[in-house]
Image (cartoon, rainbow, N blue to C red):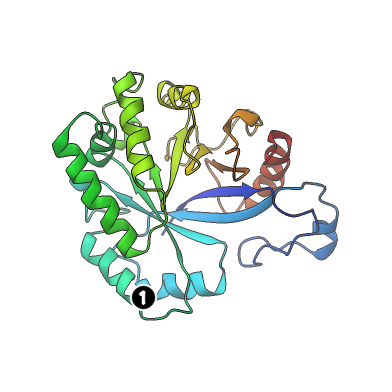
Amino acid sequence: KCYFCQLVFKNQIQHHSKPVPSIYINWTAAQLSNMTSTAKLSALGFCGADDSVNPRLLALIGQNYPLVEFGVLFRPDKEGQPRYATKNWVSNLSNLLSKNSNTKVRLAAHLCGSYVNDFLSYGANDSAKETIDLFLKQLHDWGFRRVQVNATAVNGVFTENLAYDLTIHSFLSAVRSYPELEFIVQKNEETSPLWSGLLKAKDMPENIVFLHDESKGTGKEVAEGWPTDPTFVAPSKKIVGFAGGIKPSNVKSVVQDTLEASSKSGA
């Protein structure tokens, strides 16, 4: 099974950091000591866990490699298809993890389709607000602490209204209603009306972070280098994410390149 991957960096320690788990990046101590970046890899995300995966396997990986974050895609019209887990499977995963308090497995919900459409209508439509309130509360109960909003057409979202003030207001209203969750904005050219509107907002909530992902979740590799714009580094947390075509054959070079990019951006 192939999972899409994303990297999240946070500036909180100096460059002699602990090695990344060797199952993912097998650097020597000498290689690590030569890195001058002040950024730290804080999460390595694998997206696409579904019903074909034994929840115990995810628990085992997460317990042994705490940097790993499992992304679960939620899109009602594709639930149960490959890469889209059923709610029953997610519930079973949650129950398994809750039975072992020593197993701290990171979970991120990746919203697609009607969930995003409702999320972007949170401040304008009572039915949408009710749907999102119930779902976000359920996600939190299941153990999810991060929520990625994939507001792109390829993910089944109506993108015509991304630039509307009411859309921006709805996004901010939903985020502010759930400070216990961190919300990830998928930053790419298509979502520019959304993220540019969010950046203009006064007092942008601290629980919003940005993920550079021009691939829009399709796994395409970055062709022109990783972004270094400091605008997209969450000011309070100094955190930024990168995604797009990250795989076993290039993960070492990608981590090195994105470490450099994140440092240049201030993360």
Amino acid carrying label 1: it is Ser
Left or right of 82, for residue 57 = right
Q: Residue at x 41, y 51 (%)?
A: 181
Rendering coords of residue 20 (x, y %): 67, 62
263 or 52, which lies in front? 263
Of helix, strand and loop, which one carries label 1?
A: helix
Vertical placement of 5 versus 121: above or below? Answer: below
Q: Residue at x 57, y 69 (%)?
A: 65
Q: Residue at x 40, y 25 (%)?
A: 194
The residue singled out by tag 1 in the image is 98
**Is residue 259 in view from this perspective?**
yes
Rendering coords of residue 107 (x, y %): 42, 60
Q: Quadrant of the C terminus?
A: top right
Vertical placement of 99 versus 226: above or below? Answer: below
Give residue 238's quadrant in the image: top right
User: Which residue ends up furthest to the front in the rendered image?
Assistant: 203
Q: Residue at x 21, y 51 (%)?
A: 134
254 or 103, which lies in front? 103
- Give the total number of marks visible in the rendering: 1
Rendering coords of residue 99 (x, y %): 36, 80
Q: Quadrant of the N terminus?
A: bottom left
Vertical placement of 91 versus 182: above or below? Answer: below
Rendering coords of residue 196 (x, y %): 47, 22
**Is residue 250 in view from this perspective?**
no
Dot 1, crowdedness within 10 Å: few (<14), some or many (≥20)? some
